[in-house]
Image (cartoon, rainbow, N blue to C red):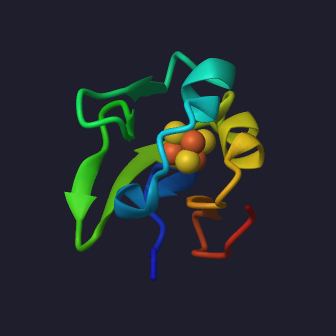
Amino acid sequence: MYKGDSMAFKIVHERESCIGCGACAAVCPGHWEMEDDGKSKLKGSKAKGENFELDVASLGCNEDAANACPVNIIHIFDKSGKKIK
Ligand code: SF4
């Protein structure tokens, strides 16, 4: 579980489960892009276990990306580790 630091939010992408629909990249192109293997990538994220993670100071359109994902594999945690999306 995420334990807070100076960043306010953590975005977690279960990339292995991505079905490549492109919705996240469509609604939030500043943070999400489609890669050659057909799955999306959270720009700047780092592999952590089976997921990719990125700490951010503000959510921006990542909340829209999480809402748009049809398979609910984009998760957002606040700095206390509470899941908010
Ligand atoms: S919206 Fe979800 S399933 Fe679609 S490309 Fe993005 S992460 Fe993958």
For the point 36% across and 30% down, the residue is 43
Give the image quadrant in which the ligand numbered 1 is located: top right
Image position of 75 (left or right of 45): right
Residue 26 or 6: which is nearer the viewer? 26
| Picture quadrant where residue 64 is located | top right
For the point 60% across and 33% down, the residue is 24
Horizontal and vertical percent position of residue 54: 39, 48
Task: Give the vertical position of 63 relative to 13 (above or below).
Answer: above
For the point 27% across and 71% down, the residue is 50
For the point 25% across and 37% down, the residue is 37
Residue 4 or 20: which is nearer the viewer? 20
Image position of 15 (left or right of 24): left
Direction bottom: furthest residue:
1
Image position of 78 (left or right of 30): right
| Picture quadrant where residue 25 is located | top right
Residue 29 or 58: which is nearer the viewer? 29
Horizontal and vertical percent position of residue 61: 68, 28
Residue 1 or 29: which is nearer the viewer? 29
Image position of 6 (left or right of 48): right
| Picture quadrant where residue 83 is located | bottom right
Horizontal and vertical percent position of residue 20: 47, 40
